[in-house]
Structure formats: C-alpha cells, structure tokens
Image (tube, coloured by chain):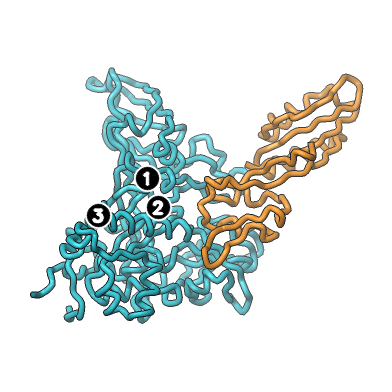
Amino acid sequence: MYKKGLVLRFPAEVVDQPIVWRLVKDFDLSFNILKATILPGKEGIMVMELSGHPKKVSQGLEYLRNLGVEVKSIGQEIYRKEEVCIHCGSCTAVCPTGALAVSRPSMEVVFEPERCSACGLCVTACVVRAMEVHLEREAL
Amino acid sequence: MGEFKVQKSIEEINERIRRGEAVVVTAEEMVRIVKEVGPVEAAREVDVVTTGTFSPMCSSGAFINFGHPVPTIKAYRVWLNGVPAYAGLAAVDIYIGATEPVEDDPLNKVFPGEFRYGGGHVIHDLVAGKKVHLRAIAYGTHCYPRKEYETEITLKDLPYAVLCNPRNAYQNYNCAINLSERTLYTYMGILRPHAGNANYATAGQLSPLLKDPYLKTIGIGTRIFLGGAKGYVIYAGTQHNMNVKRTDKGVPFTPAATLMVLGNLKEMDPRWIVGTSHLGYGCSMAVGLGIPIPILNEEVARYAGLSDEEIFTQIVDYAYDYPNGIKRNYGVVSYAELKSGKIKVLDKEVPTVPLSSYVRAREIAEILKGWIKRGEMLLTEPVAPIPGAELFPFRPRKQ
C-alpha cells in the first residue's frame, strides 16, 4: 500500500474542523498520527503517515491544501523485506534510478538504498509486496 | 524410432538412484556438460536432469473438502477470508481459484487497482499454517438442514486439500512490449510507453518444458516437484498446443505445451506457493514447479542441454496487437539476449525485465536434484503421453 509521511500545519481558522475524519471518509485513506499539537484557536501541527491508493492520497493532499493546510513531506525511505522478495525482477520495470536492478549472471534482484529516491513506485509494482515505505527516524 | 548410441530405461535409472549411484545434474549444469562433451557422452554420463520454474501461474487453485458441521450443510456459496470459492461441486467440496479477488475488492475502480488479496493469498495462508475464516450459506435440505456456517479452518485440520492447477509450466511465453503512448498495467507486468521496457516470463534454460520440447519423457503420471512437495502431471493443461512453429532444434517460438498438475496441499511449503498482486490486472499465485528429465538417450540429452542462446521467443505488442488478437511480432530474441538486460526492438535499445524468478528456479532444480540423489524420489514412467506428444520408449536396454 502507498504510504506518505507528512508534516501538516493547520491555520488557526480551521483547527475546529474534523479534517482528518474527512480524509478517511471522503478519500478512503488510513492514517497514523505520530505527533500532534492542536489547540483551539491556535495554529496546529501534526506529523502523520497517510496511506491508501496513490490517486486518493494525492486527492486528499489537494483537499488539505485547498483548506490552507501547509503540507510538507517528511523524509521516507524504501525498505525491502528480504524474506518476502522472490527475486523475480518485476520491480525493475518501474525503478527510475536503478536502485533495484538485476545482477548478472546470478539474476538476483539487488537493492541499493543509496541509489533510491524513495519515489515508492516499486511498492505496488512488487507482486509479492516486499517493498515498504518507512519514515526516516531522524526526520521525526 | 531410430536406434540410439545410448539407451537407458527408467527402471535402470531408478536402480542407480536406489543404489545412490545416479548422476543427477541441474539443467544449467547440463548445458555446460553437453557443450563440453556432446550429447552422446553426456547421455552416457548423466542419468537425470532437473529443471525448475517459479513464477505467477494463473489457472491454479485448490480443491478442499471442509468437512461437515452438525447439523450438516449443503454449501451453496462459500468464502475463504472473504474470497469466493466455487461451491457447485458437492455439499462441502469447494474449489478456490488463485485469481479470485476478495469479494469487496475495489478492483480497477480507482485505476490501477492493487488487488491486495485473493485466492492465491488464501492458499498461501493455508499452506503457511494460518487460520482462514470460512463462511458458507445454504438453502437447506432434508438431509442437509443447516443454512449458515462460519468457522476458522487450518490446513492441518481439513479432511482434504489438494492443489490442482489446470494450466502450469507454460512452454515458452511472449516477450511483451508497449508501443502506445501510455503506461500499461498487464499480466506481463508494467509496460512503459514507446517500448520503454520488454518483459519476459520464462526461466529459459531451466524451464521444464523447454528442456523436453516434444514431451518425449514427460507424460501423464510424471512425478514432479510442486509447491515444495511431490506432485504429479495429470494431463495437458488448458490452451495446450503442440502444433507450433519451432526452431531447427525443436523449441517452440511461441507459447505451446502446458501441463495440468496436482499435489497434496498439506505437504507443501509456503516458500513455493505465494499469493501475488498485479497492479491494474488482478491477483494470482506464484507456483514452484520442477520436473526431472530421465536421460534415456542422446536425443533427450541434446534437448536437456539446450542453452539460453538456443531458446527463442517472440516480441509482442500488448497495447494494440495482443488485446485485438493480432498475430504479429516485432522480431524474435533468445533468452541469452533477454537475460543480458537489453534487447533491440525497432532499432531501439530496450531494457528487459524478468517476471519469473530465475534465482528460485535454480533453487528448485537444486532441491529436486537433492531429492533424487538421496533416493527420496524415484522417476516415473508415464502411463500415457500428453495429447499431441509421443513418448520415447522406456524399454530396457538390449542385452
């Protein structure tokens, strides 16, 4: 599942609205709030993971921006669950940086995190769902 | 049938396996041996060649009998973890197909759909020993009065569970490209526009039916590696076709023979039965399958020694040609070229993408080799050929 780590700044005028609830209800997204300081009548800040269909996530983010919420991505990194990967190679069709590549002649699929741009395309391209988005701890 | 310089029978090979003297090599090793010493000498030296493939294989599924509750039920509709199973068999017999999505799946409503859970995942969960929720509804009869049944099942407690795949081990498959302007989401993976990548789905020189292209040793009843257990070839698979264009060495250029296979699900290993999700297409299941080839004579040895350079497939456009049933190709390429990482299509260099795990195919060939070497698996003489094929005689050598 597509997942994004976000820092949201809510203007004082909107903190009384059930904004996160709308993300769930209208955009079919699931959320995980990692940190939040929301007080009546004051600017609020929230760190959250938002996951769902990529199209719905971007629609949800547009909804937030239209409300005046400042949306910033936080650093994320792609992680491969080694015990799940079957080394088929499907992911190499979409990886734009070559971080996922077939090593020859062994035909193993190697993952070099230092070449990864964390675009997340491999997450849904992987047929066994071995690729995951993790938020960078330091960014939090 | 001409006479061969080397002639062995299955019985002779099995005797050598029993004595622990059989020479068993993988299809990769056989490529090297035949190159070095030629097919006649290779046939003298080698008794068995093991093959393997691990890839999403649609047309897979399992027959399950879930046992009668009390009072009894004649199940009319059945769901396993929310995935519909076919219940039109008998009171508590069902078939769960690998490509059936979970009932409330959004499918492709928001494109491309993710298809995160389906029949293949249910079968994997069962094989992994996980609890699976079963729900059945019925209309009620005198002999089977119950109208609803919900329970948790585990593979261990099921009275009967058999993997029965109507089409596996496709002999060769297309190399897919996309000549349109937009990205395609297909069963051949994600295809970027303007032939941005070329996807292929066969293990080449390790793939079972490419190493016995006329099915002269593989027939009905052949014992195989299936999902980590011992299984059997039970018939030709759906879409099986022997009447295809072949190279001068006898290997089909196009998808050709297929096998229907069966094995006891309870003996299988979750490493070799894995649910898969194909973006924008649907769900399926990766199946591990390997077939031992008895080296009866030098002709079998020559086929089993075919290398990636000698096995070809055609390049097919999945944007326009494939969905419209247009029989056209954009050239043929060898598996050696495909595995090099780049091929030439329409004078353009195109990166290649494998969809079938060569690493796991090799692992299966090695496991099968171990079983046979240790005498844990003997070879079988098929009871009949696959339709359209003609078996080599498995007769004993002339004294």
Q: In which quarter of the image is the N terminus of chain B?
A: bottom left
The subunit carrying tag 3 is B
**Chain A colour?**
orange
Determine the residue located farthest toward the left in the rendered image: B399
Q: Give percent across and percent down for residue B45.
A: 27, 73
Q: Which label sits on residue B288?
A: 2
The color chain B is rendered in: cyan
Mark nearer the N terminus (1 vs 3): 1
Label of residue B61 in the image: 1
Residue type at numbered disc 1:
Gly
Quick one: label 2 or label 3, which is nearer the N terminus? Answer: 2
Using the rendered image, report if marks 1 and 2 lie on a common chain.
Answer: yes
- Residues A92 and A28: in front is A92
Residue type at mark 3 is: Gly
**Residue on which disc 3 sits:** B375
What's the amino acid at mark 2? Gly
Residue B268 visible in this rendered orientation of the protein: yes
Q: Distance between the residues labelled 1 and 2?
A: 13 Å
